[in-house]
Structure formats: C-alpha cells, structure tokens
Image (cartoon, grey):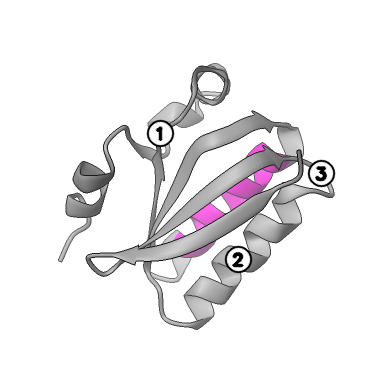
C-alpha cells in the first residue's frame, strides 16, 4: 500500500492522518514535502496520526527524525499520535520513543501544545 496523507485543523493544530508505509522512495519524500508545505504556510503545531501506518523502514525513520528537527529549529512542535505496536516497538528499540512527544488520544495531544 502506498503512502497517503490528509491534513485537517483541530483547535489551531494541524493533524495529518497518514495511511500506508513510510519508506525509501515512497512515504518518506511525501512526508517531508508535506511538512515543509505546512511550515511555509505558517503551521507550527503539527500532529502526525500514525494509526494507519503499517510499516516504517530505516529511511522512513530518518525522515521522521528529520522533520522533527526541522520543526524544532523553525520554532514549531511536532507530536506523534496513535502508534501501532510495530511502530511503537521500532521507536523503543531505536531509543527514539524518548525523543518524540507521543500520545494515544487526539484531544489530549491537541491540548498538550503550549499556547
């Protein structure tokens, strides 16, 4: 399944619902382009909903870290939402679970942004 993403606004926060795989040549490039476009349009609070992401390879993981760093350096915040077991385990193994702000409830994730 290829990568697809749809964004929506919830309480001043951009929520990006993603489906598919974040991999080399598939979701990674599209993910980066989407985040860059959101940043250019002034969106500084972004939640990536990974509930329907079924696979992330090392390149995809690198893209997640890259967009996270890009958001931070430009004064934005990026949070992850609804990790499935595979993605959660991957972030645990790579020690990235401590880097990202991860939530299981969308309302809580939206409320967690500083004003």
**Residue 67 x, y percent position in the rendering:** 56, 56
Of the numbered discs 1 and 3, the one sitting upstream in the chain is: 3
Is 62 magenta? The answer is yes
Judge depth for marks 1 and 3 and give the one in front. Answer: 1
Give the residue number, with chain letter if any, for mark 3: 24
Of the numbered discs 3 and 2, the one sitting upstream in the chain is: 3
**Horizontal placement of 18 versus 32: left or right?**
left
The residue shown at (20%, 49%) is: 112
Residue 91, compared with residue 5, is above or below; it is above
**Residue 20 x, y percent position in the rendering:** 67, 39
Q: In the rendered structure, which segment of residues is drawn in magenta? A: 60-71
Quarter holding the C terminus is bottom left
Hey, which quadrant is residue 57 in on the image?
Answer: top right
Q: In the rendering, which numbered label is found on residue 34?
A: 2
The residue shown at (50%, 73%) is: 38
Give the residue number, with chain letter if any, for mark 1: 82
Q: What SS does tag 1 mark?
A: loop
**Horizontal placement of 63 versus 106: left or right?**
right
The residue shown at (46%, 65%) is: 73
């Amino acid at each position: 399944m290829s990568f697809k993403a749809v964004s929506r606004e919830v309480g001043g926060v951009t929520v990006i619902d993603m489906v598919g795989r974040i991999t080399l040549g598939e979701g990674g490039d599209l993910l980066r382009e989407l985040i860059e476009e959101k940043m250019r349009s002034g969106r500084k609070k972004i939640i990536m909903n990974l509930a329907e992401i079924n696979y992330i390879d090392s390149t995809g993981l690198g893209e997640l870290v890259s967009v996270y760093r890009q958001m931070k350096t430009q004064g934005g915040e990026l949070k992850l939402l609804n990790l499935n077991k595979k993605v959660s385990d991957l972030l645990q193994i790579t020690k990235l679970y401590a880097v990202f702000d991860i939530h299981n409830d969308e309302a809580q994730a939206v409320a967690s942004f500083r004003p």
